[in-house]
Amino acid sequence: MPDQPGSTAIDIVRVSKVFGAGADQVAALDAVSVAIRENEFFTLLGPSGCGKTTLLRLIAGFDFPTEGHILLHGADIGTLPPNKRPVNTVFQNYALFPHMTVAENIGFGLEMLNKPKAEITARVSQMLKLVRMEALAGRRTSQISGGQQQRVALARALAPQPKVLLLDEPLSALDYKLRKEMQIELKRLQNETGITFIFVTHDQEEALTMSDRIAVMSAGRILQIGSPRDIYDHPAERFVADFIGETNFLAGAVESLDGSRARVRLKSGAVLEAAVPEGFAPNGEATIVVRPEHARLAEGEGAALAGTVETIVYFGTDTHVHVRLDDGGAFTVRRQNSRGGEDVPAEGARVAIAIPGAAAQVLRD
Amino acid sequence: MARTFDVRRQTGFTTIAAICFALLYLPIMTLVVYAFNAGTSIAIWEGFSLRWFEAAWNNNQVIEASWRSVRIASVAAVLATIAATMAALATTRTKPYRGLAGKYAFINMPLMVPEIVVAVALLIFFSRIKIATGYTGLGYLIAAHTAFCIPFAYLPIRARLESMDQSLETAAADLYANGWRTFRRITLPLLWPGILAGLMLAFVISLDDVVITEFVKSGGQDTLPTYMLGQLRRVVTPEMNAISTVFLLLSIGIVTLFFFMSRRK
């Protein structure tokens, strides 16, 4: 667990945001609370319209909460204008100033803070070096590529040494290869600067690979906060399990509960040991999720499930085996491909599916 | 695949286009050609000469009226552009509210109200002020020109503000710029081409005005257009053509200059 010690950088305390008035009211955020630690790479993950960008804008000061408090190192900044907050933003469209050079863009924040000329110059060249843009310092921002603009936007936001850096889907405009490069670059910058990053994305893969912790959001609420591993292996709610990666959902009933483990009986009759999320209240029925790569195709008795292979899809690195279960449900098993590895069953073949003890997770809803 | 519709391939397109261009430019070409007539007629060609340009240049009334036109247009255009810039900022850098569209219409009213109505209204209004204050200077013309120039300056400035990426201003605020510094360092430099376009348009519109000027001017306050109108009531010589030609070249010159200034980045 990357449970770094460290004080809280940003504390969001029961923040709500309502847009519009009267009958057109839309609650973009509904009593959201989250504590973001210092030096953390924290990601707000969710589909468009889930409120993640709204939350980022409230932290930046581009909008103000309807209710609740936003604390930065304990001080309430929720009502300050953006220019009074030691927080900087990397915008989705970069928002570089087109009438200024790369260096002027990077120095703008320091200039507005009335720093002495010599300090600005020194800091700008340090920033140019950090994002490897020294050679293009004198260029107009319209004369550089998308990836370079991205670097300038980062350098511009980092130059005033903010307490927190906010990133609003900054990689979404880049093509796949460049995006992969920038993901690594961002991690490096965060390590080197030690600044708290709050990163907004709808891309679950991006969130899993970059974050220390992730908050999964939906419909104005935070559903789950945890490390990428936590979120992926132990989704607490159906939405989280469904939104991140691929999942098999199985219906069952909780037979007994022992702390964070439970014995569940599947519809097929098999009994499994499964992890239980915090705050779980058993009420008989339960949904159990199993990641496709955590299940195995097995032979003979003792397996949890049985069914018939419907389709086999080859993906290069792995193969997906889609099984129609005997009780009518569907189940997918993912198998890593290897040179001269074991054979995959043929379509139409009878198979059994084994679910190891650590693989199953009970959902809260 | 169906061929894309091309209006230029329609029967009669070329003919109609030719007629339109001829109607627009033949009179102007004729005017320019006869400015160089050696004779005293504006219809019978008697050979090439620059005598009418010389005559206009030596005509004190022409020079005086031209100078007055330029002074009025310069002051009115600058005042109108300042007012239009503030109006454009106020109507675009705000959350949309009920009545905003009405405000646009209100600002653009001079474009819709018949000029003659404004002219008569100003005549009556200003005459009262003249009686009350005794002031008879160019101020009345400048005020009138400023008023009807505002919408012409407002339109390009507002268009520029609306097409401008507002996240740039947000970014400036994020980078510790207060409202005034955001305006000075971000909004104004990016708005500059729009402001120049508005200024140019206002200047040309003011320079060109006849109706309102004719009603508002006091004795001895002829601008170039009202002077020419007065002359046309008497004997018409190619001197009018020569003046018009210079006027035309000046206008083309200004428009071209501002076009290249606004394109330079």
Image (cartoon, rainbow, N blue to C red):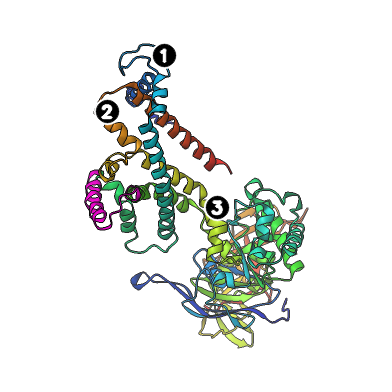
Say which chain tag 3 marks: B
Does residue B219 sit above or below A172 in this rendering?
above
Which quadrant does the C terminus of chain B fall into? Answer: top right
Name which residue lies at 49% across and 76% down. Answer: A65
On residue B48, the disc is 1
Occupied quadrant, residue A72: bottom right
Say which chain tag 1 marks: B
Occupied quadrant, residue A56: bottom right
Which residue is label 3 attached to? B189
Residue A267 seen in render: no
Start and end of the magenta stretch? B116-141
Residue nearest the observer in this picture, A196 or A324 = A196
On residue B133, the disc is none
Name which residue lies at 63% across and 59% down. Answer: A321
Task: Confirm whether circles 1 and 3 share one chain.
Answer: yes
| Amino acid type, mark 1 | Phe
Which residue is label 2 attached to? B232
Residue nearest the observer in this picture, A83 or B139 = B139
Nearer the viewer's eye, disc 1 or disc 3?
1
- In the image: residue A140, left or right of residue B117: right
| Amino acid type, mark 3 | Pro
Other-residue count near label 3 (Cα within 10 Å), few / some / many at <14 / 14–19 / ≥20? some
Nearer the viewer's eye, disc 3 or disc 2?
2
Other-residue count near label 1 (Cα within 10 Å), few / some / many at <14 / 14–19 / ≥20? few
Other-residue count near label 2 (Cα within 10 Å), few / some / many at <14 / 14–19 / ≥20? few
What is the magenta segment's predominant secondary structure?
helix
Q: CA distance from mark 1 to mark 2?
A: 23 Å
Q: Earlier in the sequence, mark 1 or mark 3?
A: 1
Q: CA distance from mark 1 to mark 3?
A: 49 Å
- In the image: residue B39, left or right of residue A218: left
